Amino acid sequence: MVTLLTTPADRELVVTRTFDAPPARVWEAWTRPEHVREWYGGAGLTTSVVDIDLRAGGAWRWGQTGPGGQEIVFSGTYEDVVPVERLDYTEVFEQMPDAGPVRVTLTFDATPDGGTALTSISFWPSNEVRDQALAAGMEAGVREQYDRLARHLEGMR
């Protein structure tokens, strides 16, 4: 399966990927800490924190630590939670808080073959911030992470 990243409009980034698992399983893998710890982030890093308060107004925080102790942590607040369908949330890269929050809508849509089309639509504070994230390797990181998620979903059957 291919993970596709596009920039269809100002400040917007869209990530799409189809997974060979029903929406309920993909939702569970995305929203339960014990699953997120298994697939989140880069394989060369250690997942050090996965906190999820899955409710409107609830906070989330996911982070990894590199071999040299460098932390890479993202956090935010859930704005709206529609189980097995949609998550609306904010996201801040804690190591660059001045970049501002990104607003994300993540949808879990059933496909005719029983899979899930996962779509992330994010709105960035500016095109510059979005483009800097992409230039810093975000695309490769997202692809690796989604590949890890696909492998984890296979093990959840």
Image (cartoon, rainbow, N blue to C red):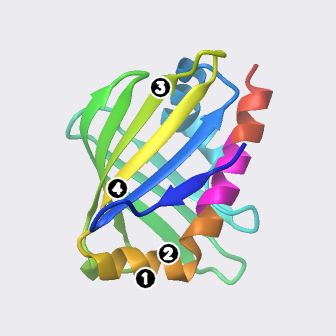
3D distance between C-alphas at marks 3 and 1: 30 Å
Residue reaching furthest to the front: 8
Number of numbered callouts drawn: 4
SS type, badge 2: helix
Q: Where does the C terminus fall, quadrant-wise?
A: top right
- Whether residue 133 appears in magenta in the rendering, the answer is no
Residue type beneath disc 4: Ser
* Residue wearing tag 4: 122
N-terminal label among 2 and 3:
3
Image: magenta residue range: 142-149
On screen, residue 112 versus residue 155, left or right, reads left
Picture layout, residue 55 above or below residue 74: above
* Residue wearing tag 2: 134
N-terminal label among 2 and 4:
4
Residue at 65% x, 68% y: name it: 140
Residue type beneath disc 2: Leu
Closer to us: 40 or 141:
141
Q: Where does the N terminus fall, quadrant-wise?
A: top right
Tell me, yes or no, whether the two marked residues, 3 and 4, touch with CB atoms within 8 Å. Answer: no
Identify the image quadrant of residue 144: bottom right
3D distance between C-alphas at marks 1 and 2: 5 Å
SS type, badge 3: strand
